[in-house]
Image (spheres, grey):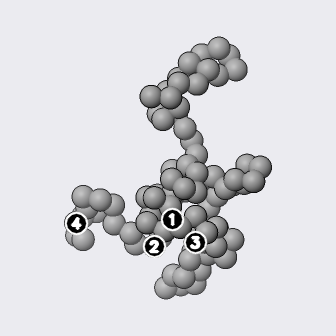
Amino acid sequence: MTQVRSGAGQTYDRALHRPYLTLAEVAARLGRSPRTLREWIVHGCPGNDGPIRLDAIRLGRCWMVRVEWLDAFEERLGVRKEGQSKGAA
């Protein structure tokens, strides 16, 4: 567990309260390279109705992706989550 002290002096578990994922973390989840993800952020991933962009923000030199944005991206691509069957809602 990585603990971080906030500006208010409170300590919290970084893994539970981290709003953003690094490109390396997203790449591991999607099985793609960080370079591919940068292309999807800038130009989009080919989809049936045109390119589908991966939402991200740039913090300094690093691209960061919110978990909700990644979930929405996977949904737009039609990627099934682990444990979901094809007919699952």
Return the x and y of residue 12 as percentages of the image width and height. Answer: 53, 23
- Residues marked 4 and 2 touching at CB (< 8 Å): no
76 to 4, vertically: above or below:
below
Task: Pick whichever, 88 or 82, lies toward us.
Answer: 82
Gap between marks 4 and 3 measured at Cα: 27 Å
Gap between marks 4 and 1 measured at Cα: 19 Å
Gap between marks 1 and 2 measured at Cα: 6 Å
Query: Residue at (67%, 76%) from the top-left corner?
Result: 43
Query: Residue at (47%, 33%) from the top-left corner?
Result: 16
Disc 4 secondary structure class: loop
Badge 3: how crowded within 10 Å, few (<14), some, or many (20+)? few
The kind of residue tagged 4 is Ser
The kind of residue tagged 1 is Phe
Task: Pick whichever, 10 or 32, lies toward us.
Answer: 32
Disc 3 secondary structure class: helix
Q: Label 2: which residue?
A: 77
Gap between marks 2 and 3 measured at Cα: 15 Å
Q: Label 3: which residue?
A: 36
Q: Earlier in the sequence, mark 2 or mark 3?
A: 3
Q: Label 1: which residue?
A: 73
